[in-house]
Image (cartoon, rainbow, N blue to C red):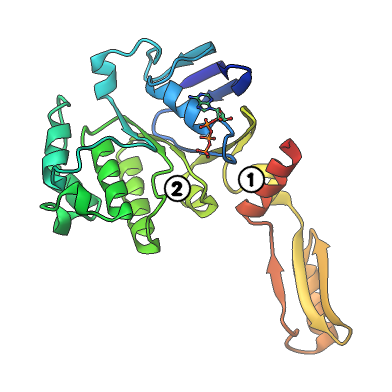
């Protein structure tokens, strides 16, 4: 996927304001950013569901501004709004969608993969919010896509369902599916993504691996402990040395010793703050 100078204007709002990005085949890329940053708009343009105001875009070698049926069959979409019919059952819905694709996956296997086998015969209107979201995911993957777009896929999932979903994504990625996901869960981005991009006010602020984003890999560690004077914290590039010195000083266990580095969430919040 190749994006150059992508722009989208709504009236006088620059929702996407000059985004450049390359996503190679087989990569899992997570787009992060606060509400209204332009994530969904970007994704919808790449999916061929929204017209861009400017810039050049190639998705699976084609311009999503002029989508063909064949091109559509090669991509899978889990968007924020779903329009399935509530009176159909899970199995009927997944089978119906499978019919749109030239080489779909087995609907029952897909239902199993999203953990809905027990609900296969239930009408969508009778499902919980998280279960409905799993149906959305099933419909996104039933066509066996080369490229999968996931817009906040795990919103409403319980922790167990989220872990199961991560496994599913890892197995799709292992099979070579390219995945572009948006999420507000930093742990999700960290668990799944090869690279993450942070978008704020329509601009890509930074792109990098979850480990190195925002200089995380080389950031100072925080060493904390409780001494006779109370709680202490030291920021340092050489925490091992600090801990060695502390252990000599205390002659044994250092009270309440912790060594931490900024989490992806810390780094992200700093970036978003700076972009405001
Ligand atoms: N159809 C529309 N008409 C006018 N403005 C829009 C439209 N869709 C989005 N916008 C505006 O464009 C900006 C980007 O919205 P977008 O939905 O892409 O953000 P997002 O990053 O996906 O946010 P969220 O995390 O809340 O889903 C916002 O300021 C929004 O109000």
Q: Tell me, for residue 65, which label it has, or none.
A: none
Q: State which quadrant residue 27 falls in.
A: top left
Nearer-the-camera pick, 91 or 19: 91
Nearer-the-camera pick, 195 or 185: 185
Task: Tell me if residue 100 comes above or below residue 172 in the rendering.
Answer: above
Q: Is residue 110 visible?
A: yes
The C terminus lies in which quarter of the figure?
top right
Label 1 – label 2 distance at C-alpha: 15 Å
Task: Tell me if residue 208 comes above or below residue 233 in the rendering.
Answer: above
Q: Residues within 10 Å of mark 1 (few under 14, many from 20)?
A: some
Is residue 188 found left or right of 129 in the rendered image?
right
Task: Tell me if residue 241 comes above or below residue 93 in the rendering.
Answer: below
Image point (77%, 57%), residue name: 220
Q: Secondary structure at mark 2?
A: helix
Is residue 61 found left or right of 209 in the rendered image?
left
Indicate the position of residue 57 as horizontal and vertical percent values.
Answer: 47, 15
The N terminus lies in which quarter of the figure?
top left
Is residue 215 found left or right of 241 in the rendered image?
left
Indicate the position of residue 18 as horizontal and vertical percent values.
Answer: 62, 19
Q: Tell me, for residue 212, which label it has, or none.
A: 1
Image point (51%, 12%), residue name: 56
Please give the count of numbered marks on the rendered protein: 2
Q: Earlier in the sequence, mark 1 or mark 2?
A: 2
Q: Tell me, for residue 192, which label it has, or none.
A: 2
Indicate the position of residue 13 as horizontal and vertical percent values.
Answer: 62, 21
Q: Is residue 23 visible?
A: no
Q: Secondary structure at mark 1?
A: loop
Task: Tell me if residue 147 comes above or below residue 224 in the rendering.
Answer: above
Image point (10%, 52%), residue name: 121
Indicate the position of residue 190 as horizontal and vertical percent values.
Answer: 52, 50
Image point (24%, 16%), residue name: 69
Q: Residues within 10 Å of mark 2 (few under 14, many from 20)?
A: many
């Amino acid at each position: 996927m190749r994006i150059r100078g992508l722009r989208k204007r709504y009236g006088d709002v620059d929702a996407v304001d000059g985004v450049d990005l390359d996503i190679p085949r087989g990569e899992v890329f997570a787009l992060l950013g606060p509400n209204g940053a332009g994530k969904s708009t970007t994704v919808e343009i790449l999916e061929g569901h929204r017209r861009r105001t400017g810039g050049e875009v190639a998705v699976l070698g084609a311009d999503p501004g002029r989508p063909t049926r064949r091109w559509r069959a090669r991509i899978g979409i889990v968007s924020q709004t779903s329009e399935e019919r509530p009176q159909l059952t899970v199995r009927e819905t997944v089978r119906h969608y499978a019919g749109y694709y030239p080489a779909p996956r087995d609907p029952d296997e897909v239902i199993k993969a999203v953990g809905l086998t027990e609900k296969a015969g239930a009408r969508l209107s009778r499902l919980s919010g998280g279960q409905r979201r799993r149906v959305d995911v099933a419909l996104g993957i039933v066509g066996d896509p080369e490229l999968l777009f996931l817009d906040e896929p795990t919103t409403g999932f319980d922790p167990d369902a989220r872990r199961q979903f991560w496994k599913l994504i890892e197995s799709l990625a292992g099979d070579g599916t390219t995945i572009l996901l948006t999420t507000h869960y930093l742990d999700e981005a960290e668990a799944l993504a090869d690279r993450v991009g942070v978008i704020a006010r329509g601009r890509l602020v930074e792109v990098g691996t979850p480990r190195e984003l925002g200089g995380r890999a080389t950031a100072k560690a925080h060493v904390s402990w409780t001494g006779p004077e109370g709680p202490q914290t030291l920021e340092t590039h050489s925490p091992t040395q600090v801990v060695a010195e502390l252990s000599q000083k205390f002659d044994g266990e250092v009270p309440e010793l912790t060594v931490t580095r900024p989490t992806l969430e810390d780094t992200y919040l700093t970036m978003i703050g700076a972009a405001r």
